[in-house]
Image (cartoon, helix red, strand yellow):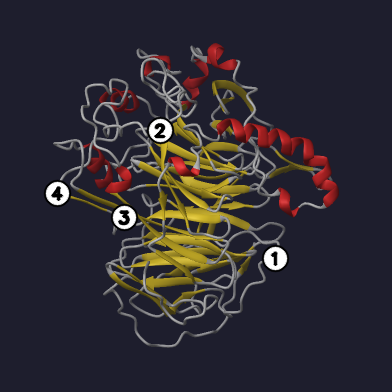
Amino acid sequence: MAAEGGGKEMNEIKTQFTTREGVYKLLTHSEYSRPNRVPFNSQGSNPVKVSFVNVNDQSGNGDRICFNVGRELYFYIYKGVRKAADLSKPIDKRIYKGTQPTCHDFNPLTATAESVSLLVGFSAGQVQLIDPIKKETSKLFNEEVGSAEFTLRLIDKSGVTCVRWVPGSESLFLVAHSSGSLYLYNVEHTCGTTPPHYQLLKQGDGYAVHTCKSKSARNPLLRWTVGEGALNEFAFSPDGKFLACASQDGFLRVFGFDAAELHGTMKSYFGGLLCVCWSPDGRYIVAGGEDDLVTVWSFSDCRVIARGHGHKSWVSVVAFDHCTTSVEDSDPPAEFSGSDEEFHEQIHFAGGRDRANSSQSHLSKRNSTDGRPVSVTYRFGSVGQDTQLCLWDLTEDILFPHLPLSSSGNSGAPSNSLPAPLPRSNSLPHSTGPTGGSTTPNSHMSSKGSSIIDSTFIATGVSKFATLSLHDTRKERHEKDHKRNHSMGHISSKSSDKLNQLSSAARTAKADAAKTLGTLLCPRMEEVPLLEPLVCKKIAHERLTVLIFLEDCLVTACQEGFICTWARPGKVGLLPSQNPTNSPSGTVV
């Protein structure tokens, strides 16, 4: 464990902590918040969220920060470890009536010093496209229609839980709701004045994808229905080809985004999953939630490879540190098989979506000479409702617990993937099928030949999806009523009469949980390695809602509305000036 920073009392808030690379220090003068710096009364409000974008400013200070606190939304120049924050001069401030911002995301492709595209999701279900530099509101999606006496939200009435631009696209974005639905929008299209009519495109275990039937182009382009209960967060893989969804029913589901095909699943130990993230090379996914654990899932093997226990309450955010993650002396194995690459290269959505070949994507495609990196360490972090920050190191002794004697027997593994570890002594007898491949639902759901898109068909737009014949719909249709485990994490707060009403559902959920526990979907605690945190520190008075790793610092935020900057070792360059406290005027929206 790392050395203690600050005081000796367990409940004392720490202002520094130590890892093998040095000391991380809290920069008090780089704290962002509401201009009056008064702690926000967070009861009944949505979590504070933070988004960053770089506008390539010629001055070299191109970082911009956006954060929401209650009904307010702020947009500042982010000075990081270089200079003190000046809260008296927000570039834009908005105060909303009747609804609260819940999440937001910048489009990095279109960001300039004169203009940025910022999507903002709201608790009432609408999504707004704004330009905080020009102080403009461009469009409103999923808005209410009707008269003064009666209004109706046509697409989804529930709150927005997560919004993201589709990687590589200037116009497509994805929105998740607490209803469990996920919608694909194009900023160039309208939402129409009548409710959308949907046609089934793809259906599988725990999900369905519909296209929007319309004579003219309109939003939403697609509707995904994922799991039971809220879809709490989703994350695109580094190359943008896969989508990981964390749902309130406790399932992590990973989809091939363009093909709308389920790649694999994982079940939480108990309760809902609240957050999810990808490793920089796309080979591992970490999820956290109401079981107080962080769970590491292998993309290529479709299985849980480790759990981390350090939090004392729900895990709110997980994130990989791309700066500390390292693979040395040997290149990692390729992430995807060649046939999978070729298949997805043919498919694209309307709206000018282009794939960006990031350095992470190139990293993931190179082959290792011996199938195993010589030295590999993945660093990721987590924050939770226990007000603690935890840092974790995922090392090769966890990633490669055994070296196989021969790789010739792994005929079912994807090409260029990691060699599978030798079977554990406590492996379940039904974990593999007669051919040695996984037969549990978290394995590849079907071969590439059974995809919704025929090998001779190349989709050139979303509108053409409606004409596809659903080759594998019939064989999957019998699974659509499959009952999965409901999250029980929220029941503890119910009154006694509510508990009596839910007792039957609770028994059913426990029975379903017992079916998955001990399988590849949800291994028992003793069946996978248990990680201990490298660092576990109390850093706030209220629950933590943000963790973002930047090049020279990491950023955290709590529900009181304070956004904190922690300088990496050797990166402290802050000027000791005091922060002004003048309160600026804002725009009431």
Q: Amino acid at mark 3?
A: His
Q: Earlier in the sequence, mark 1 or mark 2?
A: 1
**Element under label 2?**
loop
Crowd class of label 2 (few under 14; some 14 to 19; many from 20; radius 10 Å): many
| Residue 343 x %, y % | 33, 23
Q: Amino acid at mark 2?
A: Cys
Observer-nearest of 115 and 62: 62
Crowd class of label 1 (few under 14; some 14 to 19; many from 20; radius 10 Å): few
Image quarter hosting the C terminus: bottom right
Q: Are marks 1 and 2 in contact (CB under 8 Å)?
A: no
**What's the mark number on residue 322?**
3
**Element under label 1?**
loop
* Residue at the (52%, 64%) spot, across then down: 67
* Residue at the (53%, 73%) spot, across then down: 33
Which label lies toward us, 1 or 2?
Answer: 2
Which label lies toward us, 4 or 3?
Answer: 4
Which residue, as the protein is rendered here, is positioned at the far front? 425
Q: Earlier in the sequence, mark 2 or mark 3?
A: 2
Q: Which residue is mark 1?
A: 43
